[in-house]
Image: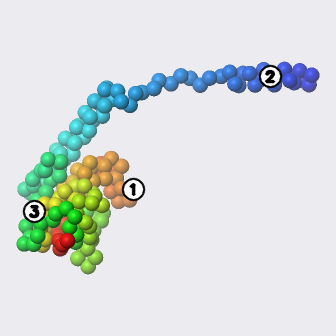
Amino acid sequence: MNFNNLPVFLLVVFSLLTSCKPPVQERVDANSTTVNRSLIETNQYMRERHREHIMAFAERAGWEMTETSTGLWYEILHRGNGPAVEKDKLVVYTFQTRLLNGKVCYAAGSEDPKKIISGKGNIESGLEEGLALMHEEGSARFLVPPYLAHGNFGDGQCIPGSAVLLITAEVLEVKR
């Protein structure tokens, strides 16, 4: 190679490298009516599939459960004689969270119960909604669809994505 032509060679290489443009990519407008409609339809489909799954599970188990407007299924096992769980009250309760295959994921017993301020959102929204249906000394079971628990991705530990949860709970104490 003749080094007298090196500057010309480098100029040609530099020109070729800088003149290349990446391919044009089509942008998808996230606010488009078509995309929004598709997402809404998908969510409605998934919600209905989870509802059918929950109904079939409860029927096989012989449980008489009630569905709330949000899609939480519950059965009050024992009403309890104490005060009702209300917003901003301290609620002391035991619980067990299981997958529908029976695997226990989380639990808190009477020796180390869970304590929350009701209505503050520090737990799954389905469990929070379920506890609000209860009274002190009461017990219940809940079938919680994924959109009221850990959603499409799970909790990254024990609960997989899109899991329906079976939660049993007993309210030990309700106080200000």
List the residue tagged with mark 1: 156
Image coordinates of residue 102 in percent, x first then y, are 24, 61
**How many residues crowd around disc 3 within 10 Å: few (fewer than 14), some, or many (20 or more)?**
many
Task: Name the quarter where the N terminus is drawn.
Answer: top right
Given contact means CB atoms under 8 Å apart, are the residues at marks 1 and 2 in contact? no
Can residue 129 be seen in this snapshot?
yes
- State left or right for residue 81 relative to residue 171: left
Q: Residue at x 69, y 24 (%)?
A: 18
List the residue tagged with mark 3: 76
Secondary structure under tag 2 reads: helix
In this rendering, the count of numbered labels is 3
Front one among 141 and 134: 134
Image coordinates of residue 21 in percent, x first then y, are 62, 23
Task: Name the quarter where the C terminus is drawn.
Answer: bottom left
Mark 2 belongs to which amino acid? Answer: Leu
Q: Earlier in the sequence, mark 3 or mark 1?
A: 3
Q: Residue at x 91, y 25 (%)?
A: 3
State the separation of the CA atoms marked 1 and 2.
Answer: 53 Å
Q: Earlier in the sequence, mark 2 or mark 3?
A: 2
List the residue tagged with mark 2: 11
State the separation of the CA atoms marked 3 and 1.
Answer: 30 Å
State the separation of the CA atoms marked 2 and 3.
Answer: 80 Å
Vertical order, 83 against 13 (above or below): below
Mark 3 belongs to which amino acid? Answer: Ile
Mark 1 belongs to which amino acid? Answer: Gly
Vertical order, 126 against 5 (above or below): below
Mark 3 vs mark 1: give the one in front: 3
**How many residues crowd around disc 2 within 10 Å: few (fewer than 14), some, or many (20 or more)?**
few
